[in-house]
Image (spheres, rainbow, N blue to C red):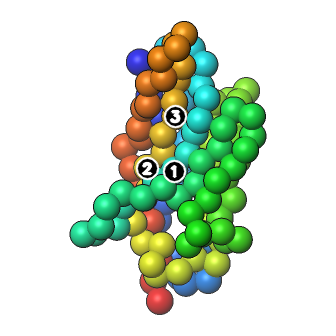
Amino acid sequence: QVQLVESGGGLEQAGGSLKLSCAASGKIISITNMGWYRQAPGKQRELVADVTDAGSTNYADSVKGRFTISRDDAKNTVTLQMNSLKPEDTAVYYCYADDRVRWVQNRYWGQGTQVTVSS
């Protein structure tokens, strides 16, 4: 089993910045993809950004140019730097990590961290 622990959420004003971090621990075999989803009240969970083990990144259109995802494989961490925050970024943010065991990938999730952006 792999455990993910997130940190860095909180309350910020529009135009401000927050940095989310997520650390994976436990029985890690080989982490491939890592990323962040978010879920706002009354909405479905949506992908914010992800990064492969090769370093390729992918962003939701709504955060392109404002958010930056990065990972540190030595520490098994993934970070989301969020700049120019908007009220519509308010949501619970969940990190995930895909751990590959031979030909099977298991996805693990963090517990979620609240991000609130005030106007």
SS at mark 2 in the image: strand
Q: CA distance from mark 3 to mark 2?
A: 10 Å
Q: Earlier in the sequence, mark 2 or mark 1?
A: 1
Q: Is residue 116 visible?
A: no
Q: Residue furthest top?
A: 102
Q: Residue at x 48, y 23 (%)?
A: 105
Q: Which numbered circle lies on residue 94? A: 2
Q: CA distance from mark 3 to mark 1?
A: 9 Å
Residue 16 location, quadrant: bottom right
Q: Residue at x 61, y 83 (%)?
A: 15
Q: CA distance from mark 2 to mark 1?
A: 6 Å
SS at mark 1 in the image: strand
Q: Name the spot of residue 99 as percent of width and height, x first.
A: 52, 23
Residue 21 sits above or below residue 16 on the image: above
The amino acid on which the numbered mark 1 sits, given as a three-letter code, is Trp
- Is disc 2 in contact with disc 1, using a CB cutoff of under 8 Å? yes
**Circle 3 residue:** 97
Q: Name the spot of residue 110 as percent of width and height, x first.
A: 42, 40
Q: Is residue 33 left or right of residue 44?
A: right
Residue 32 sits above or below residue 26 on the image: below
- Is disc 3 in contact with disc 2, using a CB cutoff of under 8 Å? no
Q: Is residue 43 visible?
A: yes
